[in-house]
Image (spheres, helix red, strand yellow):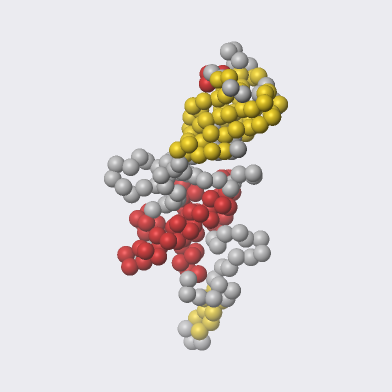
Amino acid sequence: MLTVVTAATAANLTTLERARAMLDFAPTEDAAVSTLIDQASRVIADYCRRPFGLETVRETFDAFLWGSAVLLSRSPVIAITEVLDGTQAIDIENTRQDAETGLLYRIDDDGYPLCWSGARLTVTYSAGYVLPSDEDGAPATTLPEPVERAAIRLVGAYRSLSGRDQLIKSETVEGIGSTSWWVPGAGSVLADPEAEQLLQPYRRLF
């Protein structure tokens, strides 16, 4: 069970101005593109099975008897603030984490692995990324560049799909030329193939 202690202040994976730098759209499209950024960010979070914004969460594992590692639901792990084995607090110094995978290990004072075992394990930790912001004084984003690029690519794909039949692959105008579009195939999930490829390393399996 996972409870959000401190929610992320934002969820969008890019900003209007950062998207404009890549897509070069006019200010008259700002409202529409802002909506597309919202949609693309939600689609990517669903596709990757994870939120990306930095949050503090409390995760509980019931009736456990495992080896030296448990898999936390959120990553990358920024900080562990509390670990409880039942009601007994475990010294943070007696844990070790793999920030990117979310694996949390229990170790003894000499650094050797110990087994997690007990009726309930509760871990309070911060995980996620600082998302892009155009506000003055905002902290620098830590979101991986491929994820933001995927979001912008997806916004661009949504714009290109607007106003035309999405099932049409090509169109020919006699005496002028022809245009062909990529359309998602049966094996495609996202509206842009590059975005789908960029996001593969950031998808959680469960």
Place residue 165 in its image quadrant: bottom right
Q: Residue furthest top?
A: 110
- Left-right relation of 189 to 79: right
Pick whichever, 25 or 45, lies toward us. 45
Q: Is residue 23 visible?
A: no
Q: Nearer the viewer, residue 63 or 203?
A: 63
Q: Nearer the viewer, residue 81 or 136?
A: 81
Residue toward you, 19 or 9? 9
How far across and down, in percent of the image, does residue 44 sit?
A: 53, 53
Image coords of residue 164 (percent x, y): 50, 75
Q: Position of residue 151 (x, y in %)?
A: 48, 54
> x and y percent of residue 53 in the render?
46, 43
Q: Give the residue drawn at x 49%, y 87%.
A: 175
Name the residue at 67% across, 23% down.
118
Quadrant location of the C terminus? top right
Q: Please indicate whether residue 89 sits to the left or right of residue 205 in the image.
A: left
Image point (64%, 19%), residue name: 113
Single out the residue that lies furthest toward the front: 87
Q: From the image, which quarter does the N terminus lie in?
A: top right
- Answer left or right for 33 relative to 74: left
